[in-house]
Every structure is written in C-alpha cells, then in structure tokens.
Image (spheres, rainbow, N blue to C red):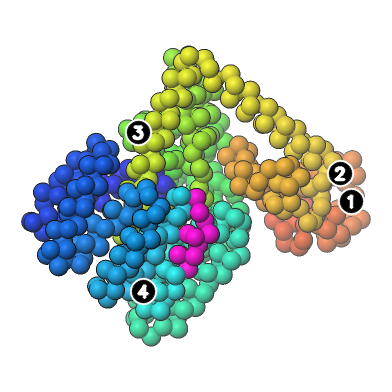
Amino acid sequence: MKIYRFTYLILILISTLSSRSWAQYDEYVELEKLYNSLNKTDSLLVTLHKHYLRAKLENDSSEQLSVLTWIYWYNDDKGKDQALKDSLISLVATLNDPREESRAYYTFASKEFERGDSSKSIQNLEKSIQIALNYFEYEQAIESVKAFNSLLIESNQYEKALSNLDYLSWSISKTREIDLENKLDLENRISMEKTSLFINTGLIDSSSYYLQALSKDLRKFDNHDLGRFKLMEATLNFRNQFYLNARDSLQKYLSTLDKTQIKDAWYILSLVERKLNNSEYSDNYLKLIDSALESEEYPQYNNGISTYRRLLSIAPDSLKNKYLGLFYHYEKKPNRNYESITKASFSDKPLITPLIVVSIIVVTFILIFLLLKSSFRKGNLNSKHKVVIEENNFNFKNKLKEWENEKEFLNPSTTLASLAVLLETNTSYLSRYFNQELQVSFSNYLSKLRINHLLDIIQSNPSIIKSKSSIQIAESLGFKSIDAYYRAFKITTGSTPNQYLKKVIMGE
C-alpha cells in the first residue's frame, strides 16, 4: 500500500467519524468536515475544542478520545504536546482498552516521525508493540511492528526487522488465548510482511519462497490483500525476467485492484511492455498514472520520479513544462520503502492519526509544486536544477562505470552498502537506481556482471570450464556458493555452464 492513499482515506476518516457521532455531535462534525475541506485550520481547531467540551459534558470518553486525537494532530505547539498526550493516555485508561492504549503510542510515534524525530518515534512504537503483546492484541501488534520495521528498513537494519517478525510469529504460536483459525490468519499477515521485506532488500529467493507459500490458498485473501499479493508476484516475475507472466497475471486482476494499487500495477506493466519493446503501450500506462495522480492532486507516489522522467523524454513541447514541474515535485518528496510508518495503520482498519497530518503535507507539496511551476515558466529554476541533476547523474554513472571496468564486482565481499560507500552515495538511492533506472535488482545486476565476465573469458578460452572445477570458477567470480553461480548462469544465458559450452562454443 502506498502513501498516496492519504487523500482518499481522509474522506473515509471523515465518514467514519460522522457515523460514530451521536446526534448531539452532528453540528460539530459537519463544521469539521467543512473547515477541513477548506483547509481552515484555526476554525477547525475552535470547532474541535467545542466538540471536545460537549463530549466531556456528556461524559462520553470514547468521543473525547476521538476528538482529542484530532486536536493532538493539528497542534503545532510542541509545548502543548505533552499535556495533550497525558490527556489521551488518561482517556485510554478510563476506557480500559489495551488496544486503544497501544494505538495511542502508535499515534505519538507517527507524529514524531512526521516531525523528523525517528528516535522518539521508535521509542513510542516499542511501547505500542509491548502493550499489544502483553494483552494479546496481535492485530495492533502487527501494525506497530510494520511501522517499526519501516524505520529499520530505511536505516538498512533488515536483520532486526526480520527478527521482529520472527518474534511476533513465535509469540502468536505460543499464545493459547486465540484459536487456530485466527493464528493462521495472523501468520499469513506476517508472511505477507516478510515477503514485502525480502522484496525491498532484493532477496529474490526468500521472497519467492514466502510468496509461493501464500499462493497455496488465495481464497483466504480479501480484495486488498489479493491485490497486494498480485503486485508482489508481478514484481518478482519482472525481476526474474518472466515478463509475460508478470503482464498476464496483472492484467487478469486489474479489475480487483483498488485505486492505490492500480497505479502500481500500471507502473509494473509499463516496465514490462518496455522490456518487450512495446514502447507505445509502456508510455500509455505512464499516461494513465499521470491522469490518476492529477485527479488526486498529485499526492505521494513512490514511482513519481521515474514516471515523469520518462514522460518528459517523450512529451511534446506543450507538456514539457508540466512534466518537468512534476518531476521536481516528486524529486522533493521523501521516498519510502514498500511500507512506511504512516501507511502501516491503514492496511485493515484506518486510524485517525496519520491521515490529517499527511493531508496537510499533501496540500503543502501541491503549493510548492505550483510555486515551482510558476518559476519554471519564468525560466529561473529550470536550467539550474537540470544542470545539478545532470552533473550528479554524470558523476555517479562515471564512478559506477569505473568500478565495472576495474572488475571490482569480482570481489566476493561486494554488497549494496559497500558499493554505496565507494560511489559516495547511500544504499536507498543506489537501490532505487538499480530498480528504477536499470530495472533490475542489485543482486541480479551483480550476477550478470560476473557471468558476462566469464562469457568473455570463455570466448577466448573455451576449455576453462573443463580445466577448472565449478567451485573454482564460482569462487573466482565472487560467488559464495555453487548454487548461486549455477542460478546466475542459467538466468543470464538460459543454459547451464555445460549446456552453454556445447551449444554456443562447440556448436552442438
């Protein structure tokens, strides 16, 4: 699920709040919806406070908690944060609901995250997870772990993220308070998160293992989870170069995808069609994405940079300014991995907290975009940003080319992190470069370099395969196992080493 669901989910949130409100709160709810739509924050806060006081007079703790959460999110005064937090915790204690207590700390974590304080966010998420586990609230525990892991992934702490999921799985298996059917359902959700984690880290084999296990009974998925499953399946097929499988599977399920997932599907289909040399189809999918983003007022979209870079390259003069502005619009937005903290609570039951904040962020980015677009028309920022990007891309690609020419890829200790250090960049950017620009995972990119190096040697010395053992060849290429060597050779050439030698070199 992607961050750009927020604008859409704001409407769901307002509808949910309205449906929860009793008749005596309707006047406040209608005003809150109006002020929210007009972005009149001051008027909204005044109405929320009146709403909150009315709920206090009615001694309605549940309504107080709901409204105070809104007030907490709209509060920009850090000095008042602690008092609001204390009030929320006090209300949660009144309700005596551990799930709400866990959600409260999730709320605090989300706001700290949006403010850029990851350390405080992590502390609150740890409390949220612990409370949920103590009271066997595993659904909320999963949501909090997903959010917690998203922060770990952004800092490349993949092993710790996996450890969290393993611990959660173990805890569920040992709990007697939930029946077998619910345990299986929770385990499937954890397996889904592990698949997502492995996809993000480029571990294709592990991703495939968990995806295959999930595929044994697709009937257990609701429409959203089925759509998410199909997107991950198509992503793996694409990375494994099974382009037709990726296309056919996605096209079959397009009608079942929600408005968030459909853009991801179009993006994957665009990549597939380009690999199949169907440029017109590929570009048409990108135009569909642009149309959808425009209708949603250009919210967060992880593939925005690559989408508009491609559209800019094929755009007529009348659209170049538009696509250039949108390219910079998404370049300035923070990228996220497959899941992120502010998305994590929306997979099943939306929480109030992140929606309001992100709606403000979305509006802010739209305003920034409009200002940038105006500047581009005046010719001020256009050339400046273009030169910076072109210089950065030039230097980055030059360093990578030098690394390839020096055959550094033969070093068995080569990792994404070590290469990022050599190229003076970070792993997030480097991974995005391989996946979006080269359209291949880092592991596949590294394997192809090694196998192509071997093929060059074979052309001049075919006897090398017979004169050296497979283990010796694998080690000389930097592979850490014979299986990895065989698998890479098969993916790159379509044949095993011996088959290749017979068919290509000896003409058999």
The residue mark sitting in front, 2 or 4, is 4
* Residue at disc 1, secondary structure: helix
Q: Earlier in the sequence, mark 2 or mark 4?
A: 4
Q: Is residue 123 magenta?
A: yes
Q: Which residue is mark 2?
A: 457
Identified by mark 4, the residue type is Glu
Residue picked out by circle 3: 297
The amino acid type found where label 3 is placed reads Glu
Mark 4 and 3 residues: CB-CB less than 8 Å, in contact? Answer: no
Circles 1 and 3, Cβ within 8 Å, touching? The answer is no
Mark 1 or mark 2: name the one nearer the start of the chain. 2
Q: Which residues are magenta?
A: 116-126
List the residue tagged with mark 4. 137
Q: CA distance from mark 4 to mark 3?
A: 37 Å
- The answer to the question of whether label 1 and label 2 lie on touching residues, with beta carbons closer than 8 A, is yes
Q: Main secondary structure of the magenta part?
A: helix
Q: Residue 330: where, in percent of width, then height?
A: 48, 35
- Residue occupying the point 23% across, 57% down: 67
Question: At 21% across and 53% down in the image, what residue appears?
Answer: 49
For marks 2 and 4, give the CA distance: 59 Å
The kind of residue tagged 1 is Ile
Q: With respect to residue 2, does 389 lie above or below?
A: above
Residue that label 1 marks: 464
Q: Which residue type carries mark 2?
A: Ile
